């Protein structure tokens, strides 16, 4: 059975002869980001008209509908028994098991038809994203009156370089509603990235409803004020706005977002921070801290001494939370944080010191390792794996852990040498909260905690696989991710401004082959995608695109 989706676009009906069939195309007609593996320019063009059907197998209905939505409003959907794959004048979506890469696809556009072959539905989806970038930018605005849709002929064979292509978002420091998170997911999809790392818990706010512990969101989801300006940074004094701030996602909302991402072939990895960055949770349930409290949801930024106590009760509490989290998120990976854990409370805790002795641990780093291993064992028992920030290497790595290298690349290299999987997110290239201009230009920018900066060109230059790793170890580098810490991003507009166009540069780093990356060429294509940002209503750092 074949599903035919008719596309209604306010444009002229196609005439029998295609007046563009002799058109000579050039490189500039294909401004696709990320750059495809192999693109062969051919002569001619395909014309879309209101009767152009999208023909696909019923297993590709979701992708067919997505394609139809991109091209224009759908006038009718019907099941057709036509099994001919070469119907002239049609857009065909087809699964092709002979394609080797699970996310690979082929896109063929001729005068007669368009054909997208994918190894899997994901491959088809990426083929659609490439096709999208060959359409006039006006299609990004549903209100545009498109009178002509001419798609240049081409043969593309494409697949990603890395299996992990991620973007992170901290919703703890500032909270963003579901509608914004969906916009983020759409951006991730447009860039053929496949992972959204959702940083859901922080000292400044707990953002995920946990049924067994309602106070996590009732108490931990809100703070009684927020540090103003650069408070705490660069020795600025702490001042607060004293305005209650917060929010959280209900489990129903989480399910909705997970489904939205899944339809776009994006896995969401939830992060539940432990044993540090846990002040909001401790404000709600002080019995799981080392001192008994009282605690307050943090109103300022930074790293706090308050961390979880390594007691059986705490492990029970965390396991209950993780159980609910794993029911909501089907991802293979669960991120358990592990970064920036100050050990002072454990040094001063009789219980923690006794535990170190009883378990024969070397010191507080050994205790952190014990803590993570306990959590890993539980997560593994549910058939999942943990990811932790690179501090989880200290005191000994948990047996099956994947390491997210953020303090440069040292942690990633060390983990790969130990034959653990690695995701690269070094601050130098992958922290999109940094300024994107040098100090001179920063005067005109919204404030940011530090003066460090990463230009779009620097992001583009990033090479996730460290040169010092031989192939038998470099294969542990799964990919890279852009991190977005939101202390200084109180609005969604600000998030987009920080992320765009740097995530666009990163998307090519993680998808395209090293040989296919060329800054000048990318910069030309960036001008095109920026027009899409405009029509999609995204905010972005225009100067990062316009200047050479
Ligand atoms: C981090 O930036 N603290 C992972």
Image: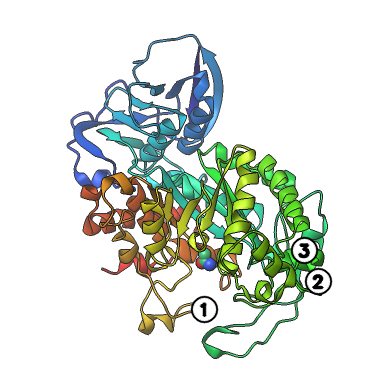
Position of 290 relative to 59 (above/below): below
Identify the residue position indicated by label 2 in the image.
292
How has the structure been colored for display? rainbow
Mark 1 near mark 3, Cβ–Cβ under 8 Å?
Answer: no
Say left or right for 221 vs 437: right
Mark 3 neighbour density, 10 Å: few (under 14) some (14–19) many (20 or more):
many
- Please say if 251 is above or below 366: above
Residue ID at (64%, 63%):
275
Residue placed at 56% from the left, 42% from the top?
261
Residue 192, given in percent of the width and then of the height, sits at: 42, 44
Q: How far apart are labels 3 and 2 at the CA level?
A: 7 Å
* Label 1 or label 2, whichever comes before in sequence order: 2
| CA–CA distance in space, label 1 to label 2 | 31 Å
SS type, badge 1 = loop
Left or right, 327 with reference to 476: right
Residue for badge 1? 449
Residue ID at (52%, 39%): 264
Which residue is tagged 3?
A: 288
User: Badge 2, how many Cα within 10 Å: few under 14, some, many 20+?
Assistant: few
Question: SS class of the residue under badge 2?
Answer: loop
- Gap between marks 1 and 3, in whole Å? 31 Å
Pick the residue in front: 237 or 295: 295
């Amino acid at each position: 059975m074949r599903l035919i989706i008719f596309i209604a676009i306010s444009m002229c009906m196609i005439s029998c002869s295609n007046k563009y069939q002799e058109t000579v195309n050039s490189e500039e007609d294909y401004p696709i980001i990320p750059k495809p593996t192999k693109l062969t320019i051919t002569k001619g063009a395909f014309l879309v008209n209101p009767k152009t059907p999208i023909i696909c197998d019923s297993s590709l209905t979701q992708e067919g509908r997505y394609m139809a939505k991109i091209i224009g409003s759908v006038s009718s959907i019907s099941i057709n028994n036509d099994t001919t794959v070469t119907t002239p004048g049609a857009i065909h979506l087809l699964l092709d098991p002979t394609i080797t890469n699970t996310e690979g696809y082929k896109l063929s556009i001729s005068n007669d038809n368009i054909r997208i072959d994918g190894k899997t539905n994901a491959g088809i989806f990426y083929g659609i994203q490439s096709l999208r970038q060959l359409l006039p930018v006006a299609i990004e605005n549903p209100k545009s009156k498109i009178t002509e849709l001419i798609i240049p002929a081409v043969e593309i064979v494409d697949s990603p370089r890395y299996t992990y292509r991620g973007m992170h978002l901290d919703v703890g420091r500032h909270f963003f509603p579901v509608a914004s998170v969906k916009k983020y997911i759409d951006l991730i999809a447009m860039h053929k990235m496949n992972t959204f790392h959702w940083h859901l818990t922080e000292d400044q706010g707990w953002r995920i409803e946990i049924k067994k512990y309602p106070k996590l969101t009732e108490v931990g989801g809100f703070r009684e004020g927020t540090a103003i300006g650069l408070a705490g940074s660069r020795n600025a004094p702490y001042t607060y706005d004293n305005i209650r701030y917060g929010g959280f996602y209900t489990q129903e909302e989480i399910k909705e977002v997970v489904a939205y991402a899944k339809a776009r072939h994006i896995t969401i990895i939830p992060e539940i921070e432990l044993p540090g960055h846990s002040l909001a949770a401790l404000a709600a349930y002080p019995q799981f801290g080392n001192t008994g409290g009282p605690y307050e949801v943090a109103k300022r930024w930074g790293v706090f001494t308050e961390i979880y106590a390594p007691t059986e009760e705490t492990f029970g509490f965390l396991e209950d939370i993780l159980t609910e989290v794993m029911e909501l998120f089907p991802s293979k990976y669960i991120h358990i944080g592990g970064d920036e854990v100050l050990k002072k409370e454990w040094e001063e805790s009789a219980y923690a010191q006794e535990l170190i002795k009883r378990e024969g641990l070397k010191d507080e780093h050994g205790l952190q390792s014990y803590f993570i291993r306990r959590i890993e064992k539980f997560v593994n028992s549910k058939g999942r794996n943990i990811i932790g920030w690179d501090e989880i290497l200290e005191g000994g790595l948990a047996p099956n852990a994947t390491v997210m290298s953020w303090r440069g690349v040292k942690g990633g290299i060390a983990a790969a040498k130990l034959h653990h999987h690695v995701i690269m997110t070094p601050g130098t290239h992958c922290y999109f909260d940094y300024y994107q201009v040098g100090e001179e230009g920063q005067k005109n920018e919204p404030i940011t905690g530090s003066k460090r900066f990463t230009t779009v060109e620097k992001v583009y230059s990033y090479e996730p696989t460290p040169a010092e790793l031989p192939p038998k170890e470099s294969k542990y580098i799964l990919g890279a991710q852009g991190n977005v810490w939101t202390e200084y991003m109180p609005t969604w507009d600000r998030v987009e401004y920080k992320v765009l166009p740097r995530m666009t540069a990163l998307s090519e780093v993680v998808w395209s082959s090293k040989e296919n990356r060329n800054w000048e060429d990318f910069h030309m294509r960036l001008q095109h995608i920026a027009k899409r940002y405009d029509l999609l209503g995204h905010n972005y750092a225009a100067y990062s695109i316009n200047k050479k």
